[in-house]
Image: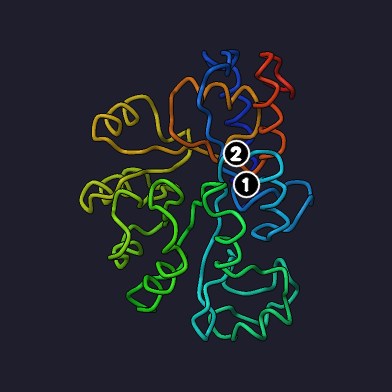
Amino acid sequence: MADLVSRLNTLANRIWGMAPGARSSLQDRDVRLVAHRGAHADGVAVENTLNAFDLCFERGVWGVELDVQLTRDLEPVIHHDPHLGRLHGRPDLTIAEVDFATLRRVAPAVPHLSEVVERYGGRMHLMIEVKESWRERSEVPEVVSRALADLTPGGDFHLLSLVPDHLEGFRLIPPSAYVDVAWLNPGEIIAANRRLGHGGISGSFVFLGPKRLRELRQEGKKIGTGFVEFGGALRREATRDVDWIFTDQILRLQAHLAASSNDQPSDKPS
């Protein structure tokens, strides 16, 4: 299923790259690229690790998206999957069921949230996706909020979730810094976002068309679109004046963005 979605996203990018605006200049535009799980395409680094985030920081990327969940002893760590199988070869270990000391010994590349904040806080924007519900693990909001206490909500970071209710437990962080992520259900997520008064929406550029963008802007919402893969699609999204552009191809698109100082596209297809 994931491979099919990836192929469909690539096809949509190629079509988007032929749309009006795909050859527009990026000069003088405030394009804010967000590296989804850091720089990891083509195996340059393991996703959601300091190596993946370092590559972004070294190239001047505006922001990184990362996933946070708690270990058994309530330490916030950066990892997408509930278990360590796909990335670290230990499908028998589930993050919520292992203590941090064991996790650090078995998979030392999995960062602690405090390490990420210390290394990049205030220097790259952090888009932090909350993977667990405060209704099931009541400690999530307090633990995550404590790690972010020295940063400015909305200025230094946003909280993201595929489930809008996951963000409702964060009483110390204002709803203006909450971003609800739509997958294949944009209508449902947008309705929940409006009902809860959250500040932002993120979703596929395919589902966030002109009418939705116009309505969300009129409501004062921040808007992020993804997943952009090629320069033409990046330019097209920039002309739509979205606030953030998410990508799994951050090194390619950051190079394209840098080349825009001379208005010379750096990748094909455009």
Q: Residues within 10 Å of mark 1 (few under 14, many from 20)?
A: few
Q: Which residue is mark 1?
A: 4
Q: Which residue is mark 2?
A: 8
Residue, x 55% and y 67% (percent of image)?
A: 113
**250 in relation to 241, above or below:** below
Q: Which residue occupies the foreground of this view, 67 or 9?
A: 67
Asked whether, in this view, residue 194 is left or right of residue 115, the answer is left
Residue, x 23% and y 53% (percent of image)?
A: 196
Locate the N terminus by quadrant: bottom right
Asked whether, in this view, residue 112 is left or right of residue 91, the answer is left
Q: Residues within 10 Å of mark 2 (few under 14, many from 20)?
A: few
Q: Amino acid at mark 2?
A: Leu
**121 in relation to 253, above or below:** below
> In the image, residue 35 lies at what x, y percent?
60, 45
Extreme residue in the left direction: 195
Residue, x 62% and y 46% (percent of image)?
A: 4
**62 in relation to 264, above or below:** below
> In the image, residue 264 lies at what x, y percent?
71, 15
> In the image, residue 17 lies at what x, y percent?
60, 21
Marks 2 and 1 in Cβ contact (< 8 Å): yes
Extreme residue in the front direction: 150
Residue 131, numbered circle: none
Residue, x 58% and y 26% (percent of image)?
A: 233
> In the image, residue 225 lies at what x, y percent?
48, 37
Asked whether, in this view, residue 170 is left or right of residue 95, the answer is left
Local SS, label 2: helix
Dividing the picture into quadrants, the one containing residue 133 is bottom left
**94 in relation to 132, above or below:** below
**For the residues marked 2 and 1, what is the alpha-carbon distance in whole angstroms?**
6 Å
Query: Total of numbered circles in the picture?
Result: 2
Locate the C terminus by quadrant: top right
Q: Amino acid at mark 1?
A: Leu
